[in-house]
Amino acid sequence: MRHPEGLAKPQQPDPTAEAAPAQSAAGNLPVPLIVAGLALALLAGEFGYSLLGNDTWLRHPGFTAWQTVVVAITVQALPFLLFGTLISGAVNAFVPAELFTRVLPRNPALAVPVASAAGVVLPGCECASVPVAGSLIRRGVTPAAAFAFLLSAPAINPIVLASTAVAFPGSPEMVAARLAASLATSAAMGWLWMRFGREDWLRMPARHSGHEHGRSRLNEFRLGFQHDFLHAGGFLVLGAMAAAAFNVTVPRSVLDMFAGSPWMSVLFLAALAVVLAVCSEADAFVAASLTGFSPTARLAFMVVGPMVDLKLIALQVGTFGRAFALRFSAATAVTAVTCSVVVGWWLL
């Protein structure tokens, strides 16, 4: 595979591109932030009761059960989300991208597992991992290693592993299984790209990620943290609401139809992870709430979600192009499910 700089000529970055995603001008708030605000207002039950009285749908047992589950998932996951986005913003603003080219082996086949393992010590959320991977490619990192890091950083960083341990108390094997399956998936995808990836699928990104000379590092940290926390927080609330609705409204017979089959349960929760798009710092709490499913199925939910979901596919389309995103996401989903099943059979 030729040097990544031969893929396409980088465009000049727009000086306004960095600040635009993080800005929240009046009347143009991010959709997830609006949803989160509405959800928090809705969850203020006592205020709703005082306005609408006791004989309303807010007193219905089904709604109160839904409300309890949403609050429980959100409150448990919020500290991990906050800490994770703080670290992600700090890495993006203060760690130079050139560091990766110095520490990675020159042999691409060896650089892939090293880049995968780097996700353990260099945390990042899903939203940050895509532009960071693009920045690494522009600075000379082989695409295979950059894509391995893209998949591993939001899946196996310390915040994610700690949140998994809290969500599954007394089950260290679930933490080990998540680490092993995610590492295997990210490394496998890096090697698959080396073998089968084509340069004409990949559009080189123009947007910069990380520190630029002449810009305030503290300001970049503030903008990065603000963007990641507001968007990931909105998706967290959406995921908590969907998981709670799933637990409260779906009949037990439907759950038994999927949960009773080992293969159907894994595929169902893998597809659910793609649709819910819960941030990786919080998805363990959503998985733990899906008590009707097997440990392997819940492992698949936690492995697939940080690597393939709707918002990640959209980010990849915008950064690397549609030809890359569709192929890479489909291959990642198949690889993640396969690794989850193998690791789940082995450890769970």
Image (cartoon, rainbow, N blue to C red):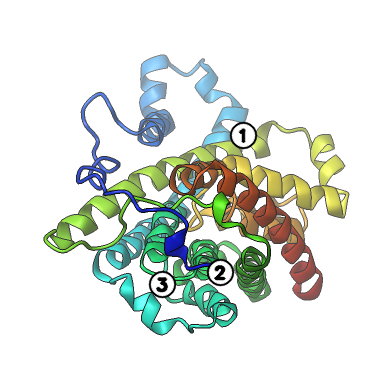
**Residue underneath mark 1:** 245
Could you tell which of marks 3 and 1 lies nearer the N-terminus?
Answer: 3
In the structure shown, which secondary structural element does the residue marked by tag 1 occupy? Answer: helix
Q: Residue at x 50, y 47 (%)?
A: 316
Residue 157 vs 265, above or below: the answer is below
Front residue of 30 and 162:
30
- Residue 212 placement, left or right of 282: left
Q: Position of residue 229 (x, y in %)?
A: 34, 49
Q: CA distance from mark 2 to mark 1?
A: 24 Å
Q: Residue at x 52, y 35 (%)?
A: 67
- Residue 115 placement, left or right of 124: right
Could you tell which of marks 2 and 1 lies nearer the N-terminus?
Answer: 2
Q: Position of residue 249 (x, y in %)?
A: 68, 31
Q: Which amino acid type is marked by label 2?
A: Ala
Badge 1 crowding class, 10 Å Cα cut-off, few under 14, some 14 to 19, many 20 or more, is: some
The answer to whether the residue labelled 3 contacts the one labelled 1, judged by CB atoms less than 8 Å apart, is no
Quadrant (top left, top right, bottom left, bottom right) of the C terminus = bottom right
- Residue 12 placement, left or right of 152: left
Q: CA distance from mark 2 to mark 3?
A: 19 Å
- Where residue 253 sits, quadrant-wise, is top right
Q: Residue at x 56, y 51 (%)?
A: 200
**Residue underneath mark 3:** 122
Could you tell which of marks 2 and 3 lies nearer the N-terminus?
Answer: 3
Quadrant (top left, top right, bottom left, bottom right) of the N terminus = bottom right
Of the residues tagged 3 and 1, which is closer to the observer? 3
Of the residues tagged 2 and 3, which is closer to the observer? 3
- Residue 136 placement, left or right of 339: left
Front residue of 288 and 273:
273
The answer to whether the residue labelled 2 contacts the one labelled 3, judged by CB atoms less than 8 Å apart, is no
**Residue underneath mark 2:** 165
In the structure shown, which secondary structural element does the residue marked by tag 2 occupy? Answer: helix
